[in-house]
Image (cartoon, rainbow, N blue to C red):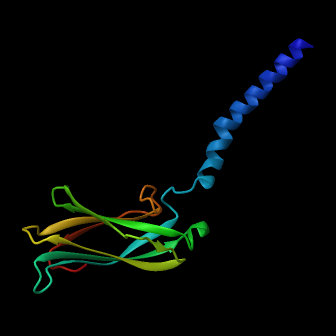
């Protein structure tokens, strides 16, 4: 009888291992969302220009989005825009300060400025994140901009 209990315990251990290895990874992703595919993000308009009478360079991007995960609709989320020089150096990161409530479909504008300099081109990378700005909720949009040319 003692041998049967040992075999039964080994069976339970084996079952536990099988669940841990094969079942949990499948269930884990939907349960612990934030995998970067909750929202589809697209660029609508991009500008990099020197406003008249100002001594700063202005960057303005307008994005459109569509929420693909119903659990994300009506949630407070944020967005980040990173700005890089032509050689890949990060020169500024800006975000939506208090976030915004995600609608099923919508648009979001990112605006920032840089001190007037000799920079003629930049690369922007925009994405939506959770409010802590740690977990991606969307794809990233990379865009190359040349001063005074609208895309």
Occupied quadrant, residue 97: bottom left
Occupied quadrant, residue 55: bottom left
Q: Is residue 24 above or below residue 30?
A: above
Q: Position of residue 88 (x, y in %)?
A: 20, 55
Tell me which residue sits at (89%, 13%) in the image: 2
Quadrant occupied by the C terminus: bottom left
Q: Position of residue 76 (x, y in %)?
A: 51, 70
Q: Is residue 76 left or right of residue 80?
A: right
Tell me which residue sits at (82%, 17%) in the image: 6
| Residue at the extreme right of the image, as rendered | 1
| Residue at the extreme left of the image, as rendered | 118
Tell me which residue sits at (49%, 67%) in the image: 39
Quadrant occupied by the N terminus: top right
| Residue at the extreme front of the image, as rendered | 98
Q: How many marks?
A: 0
Q: Position of residue 103 (x, y in %)?
A: 53, 77
Q: Position of residue 110 (x, y in %)?
A: 32, 74
Q: Is residue 68 left or right of residue 10?
A: left
| Residue at the extreme top of the image, as rendered | 2
Q: Is residue 54 left or right of residue 135?
A: left
Occupied quadrant, residue 54: bottom left
Tell me which residue sits at (61%, 67%) in the image: 71
């Amino acid at each position: 009888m003692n041998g049967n209990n040992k075999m039964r315990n080994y069976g339970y251990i084996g079952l536990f291992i099988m669940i841990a290895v094969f079942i949990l990874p499948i269930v884990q992703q939907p349960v612990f969302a934030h995998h970067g595919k909750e929202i589809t993000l697209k660029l609508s308009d991009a500008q990099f220009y020197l406003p008249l009478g100002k001594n700063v360079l202005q960057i303005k991007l307008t994005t459109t989005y569509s929420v693909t995960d119903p659990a994300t609709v009506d949630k407070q989320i944020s967005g980040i825009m990173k700005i890089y020089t032509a050689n890949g150096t990060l020169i500024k990161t800006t975000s939506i300060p208090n976030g915004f409530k995600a609608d099923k479909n919508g648009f979001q504008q990112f605006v920032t400025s840089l001190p007037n300099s000799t920079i003629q081109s930049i690369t922007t990378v925009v994405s939506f994140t959770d409010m802590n700005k740690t977990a991606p909720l969307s794809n990233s949009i990379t865009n190359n901009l040349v001063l005074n040319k609208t895309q």
